Amino acid sequence: MIFFRQLLFPFAIFYGIITFLRNFLYDKGILKSYSFDIPILAVGNLSVGGTGKTPQIEYLIRLLSSNYKIATLSRGYKRKSSGFILANTASNVLLLGDEPFQMHQKFPQIQVAVDSNRKNGIEQLLNQSVKPEIILLDDAFQHRKVKAGFYILLTSYDDLYFKDYMLPTGNLREYRSGAKRADMIIVTKCPKNLSELAQQVINDTIGMDKPLFFTYIDYDDTVYSEEKSISVKELQSIDKLLLAGIAKPEPFFVYLQNKSDLVLKFPDHHHFSENEILEIKKKANNKPIITTEKDFVRLKDSILKEQLYYLPIKSSFISDREIFDKTILDYVGASTRNR
């Protein structure tokens, strides 16, 4: 696979030129970006998939929602609908997509919207009878048609953007220089005990005068169904089936897996067919099925629901959490006061 991607290097050059020209046209104002009189934070990355955008959006929701009316806006990847949709009690995973539906269920106090046209999505949110005070744009770093007030760039510790190459040779959506648009950078999915020296090396390599933070995925010590829970410690002595349809499932499996466990991997954002669900049911053979939060929302209404559990995760800071919080709150506070 690596050799095949290397053969595609000429296409990576061509793709890079296209994205460079597009960014150049936006930077020079030839292509128009639209700003809005409301604090808008965009969370995104330079690469495709697997940088932990959803846990970071959820962190921001927890930080801000007690004092502000929050709305999230994403395109709703792989949803079976189109146009602008604002989540309500009748919404489901097919209408919203798995990640927005997960947020809708997890944070009922906020507005969750989907629209591939972020400009239209923001305009629709601002036309609601209850208007948001802050909008969080999910996976919108390359969506230049909207100019957010604050950009948070994520890069995964095991796939740092400055070591990567353009698609299809690498995983970059645009050249590394795109990182200059960020107001801050977060290195996600770090080892929990990442040393200060290792952090400094990454900081020196990035070489930009921007706030840099390091986070890790913090796994819960309990898995949950809609009615029951099992401690992870108890799971160590139970045969089970582990199932994940996310970009980089290995840490999830490592955290829970015993030698006797059956492990099933599916593509990111996978929509499970009836035959696949029947096969999973057969393989589980009445054992608990442990999956991710994102997969749980796609499977919880299926025939698996009686034995289906999910493992919650959250993004936690290795250090400087208070500085991160203050940076975000200062931006939001200043933007709100200036309206």
Image (cartoon, grey):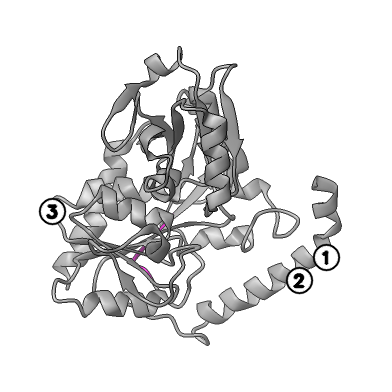
Dominant secondary structure, magenta: strand
**Residue 14 image label:** 2
In the image, what residue type sits under mark 3? Asn
- Residue 282 x %, y %: 55, 34
Type of the residue with mark 1? Pro
Which mark, by number, is residue 10?
Answer: 1
Q: Residue at x 54, y 38 (%)?
A: 280
Nearest to the observer: residue 155 or residue 98: 98
Residue 35: x percent and y percent? 34, 78
Residue sitting nearer the eye, 133 or 74: 74
Alpha carbon distance from label 1 to label 2: 6 Å
Q: Is 92 part of what is drawn in magenta?
A: no
Residue 195 higher or lower than 135, as above or below: above
In the picture of the structure, the residue carrying the numbered disc 3 is 67
The percent position of residue 13, horizontal first and vertical second, equals 77, 66
Distance in Å between CA atoms under marks 2 and 3: 46 Å
Residue stretch rendered in magenta on the structure:
148-152
Pick whichever, 279 or 56, lies toward us: 279
The front one of 322 and 106 is 106
Disc 2, SS: helix
Identity, as a three-letter code, of the amino acid under mark 2: Phe
Quadrant of the drawing holding the C terminus: bottom left
Q: Which mark is residue 248?
A: none
The reply to whether residue 39 is visible in this rendering is: yes
In the rendered view, would you say 28 is above or below 287? below
Alpha carbons under labels 1 and 3: distance apart: 50 Å
Decide which of tag 1 and tag 3 comes sooner along the chain. Answer: 1
Quarter residue 176 falls in: bottom right
